[in-house]
Image (cartoon, helix red, strand yellow):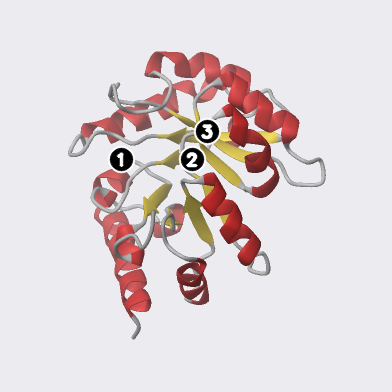
Amino acid sequence: MSNFASQYAQVLQQIEHACQKVERDCTAVQLLAVSKNHPASHITALYELGQRTFGENYLQEALDKIAILEDLAIEWHFIGHVQRNKTKHLAEKFDWVHGVDRLVIAERLSRQRPVDLASLNICLQVNIDEQESKDGCQPHEVVNLVTQMSQLPNIHLRGLMVIPAPNNVAAFADAQALFEQVKVHHAHPQNWDTLSMGMSGDVEAAIAAGSTIVRIGTALFGERHYR
């Protein structure tokens, strides 16, 4: 078995075991393979094992890979912080954008999404434990942002994305509570179904708190190869 096959199997098993411990259906948790700083050939290797969703942090790197791998049926997620000058490419090339934390960004994505594409799925990034060094809106801003963003055309506001401080597992429960509290403010609550949280070091805690997308990089691909 190749290293990729072994690592992929181990990560899938870890997710399954974490779900079993808290009596969750493992099909309710999606593995997002974070391929930043790894070449397109590594994405192809994981794709051949059955992985279909990949996440990138750096726009130009992602656009290069999307062009190289355009023949593969990949669902591309952008998980980096979103700046205004990035929105056009994100709206045109991605299926999901996780790092939206301002209304103006959501408005630009909505306006720039090509009409021949399905609505762009977005997550609202929340600085759940109010770290000074982290991007994301503040928890008290979420209600207003959900109310306004969920009314925009050409995008589907799907849920929240959080990156808590290391070892702050309580933040996952805070994110789950916030997710439930603000659902009533969503214009289309049937779309409100996603908690993007948990990485290689805290998968079990995130799943226990209700994560529906876990973002795994190093455990799948090994150490970064460039950048």
Q: CA distance from mark 2 to mark 3?
A: 19 Å
Q: Amino acid at mark 2?
A: Thr
Query: Distance from label 2 to label 1 (Cα)?
Result: 12 Å
Q: Which mark is residue 194?
A: 2
Q: Nearer the viewer, residue 176 or 6?
A: 6
Rendering coords of residue 34 (x, y %): 42, 55
Q: Position of residue 139 (x, y in %)?
A: 38, 19
Examine the rendering and report whether any part of residue 165 can be seen: yes
Could you say whether the residue bearing mark 1 is in a helix, strand or loop? loop
- In the image, residue 125 lies at what x, y percent? 45, 30
Against 86, residue 205 (above or below) is: below
Give the mark nearer the N terminus: 2 vs 3: 3
Q: Is residue 178 left or right of residue 205?
A: right
Residue position for label 1: 209
Can you say whether 119 is above or below 137 in the image? below
Q: Residue at x 35, y 65 (%)?
A: 221
The residue most toward the left is 167
Left or right placement of residue 226 versus residue 169 in this view: right
Q: Secondary structure at mark 2?
A: strand
Q: Quadrant of residue 178?
A: top left
